[in-house]
Amino acid sequence: MELKTSSVAKRLGVSPKTIQRWVKKYEIPCKKNEAGHYIFDSETLALLEQIKFEQGAALEECETEEENEKNILCPEDFFSTHLQPHLNEFTSRFQRIERQLEQKADEVVSVQLLQHRREIEELHSYIRQLEQRISLLEETNEKREADDSLSKKQKRRGVGRIIGLFV
């Protein structure tokens, strides 16, 4: 006997999607036809019936527990017993993460400040070197100008004397 998903779903009184979910969730070994649809045999059908029975029992237990809790707990008690501990835990975790984030931000800023300070010191030393080079170049330029002015004056006098002899 080979049944398709829709036939098994009708037989068990559930939707075809539920059957597909159970096959995947419980890793039920099923054959597939050439179109890729599940084909169920009698063993697989029995297994699915057992899963449905267990699922139904679990749902009934949950429903009775929920009804009992509804009868016992009022909204304030429910909040204080079920939600407040989780809320406190999340609040403390959030504060801890916030502190860690601030600490990391401070560390990053400190590293950046040290790096900028190093770069500024390097620029200052480079500027000092440039100033020294400029002063050396100015001194050598002044010496050259002085030497050039002396040599030009002497040449003019010498040339003027020689020319004066011929005139």
Image (cartoon, grey):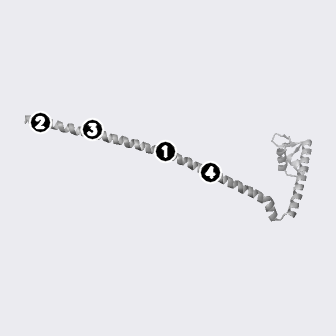
10 or 17: nearer the viewer: 17
Q: Which residue is mark 2?
A: 161
Disc 1 or 3, which lies upstream in sequence? 1
Disc 1 or 4, which lies upstream in sequence? 4
Circles 4 and 3, Cβ within 8 Å, touching? The answer is no
> On residue 55, which mark appears?
none
The residue type indicated by label 3 comes to: Arg
Q: Quadrant of residue 153?
A: top left
Judge whether residue 136 can be spotted in this image.
Answer: yes
Disc 2 or 4, which lies upstream in sequence? 4
4 or 151: nearer the viewer: 151
Asked if 10 appears above or below 33 in the picture, the reply is below
Q: Which residue is mark 1?
A: 119
User: Between marks 2 and 3, how big is the CA–CA gap?
Assistant: 26 Å
Where's the C terminus, which quadrant?
top left
* Dot 4 crowding, Cα within 10 Å, few <14, some 14–19, many 20+: few
Q: Which residue is mark 4?
A: 103
The residue type indicated by label 1 comes to: Glu
SS class, disc 2: helix
Q: Which residue is mark 3?
A: 144
Judge from the rendering whether residue 156 lies leftward or rightward of residue 116; answer left or right: left
Q: Where does residue 33 sit, x and y in percent of width and height?
A: 83, 40
SS class, disc 1: helix
Judge whether residue 11 can be spotted in this image.
Answer: no
75 or 155: nearer the viewer: 155
Residue at figure coordinates x 90%, y 53% from the top left: 57
Disc 4 or 3, which lies upstream in sequence? 4
SS class, disc 4: helix
Q: Where does residue 34 sit, x and y in percent of width and height?
A: 81, 39
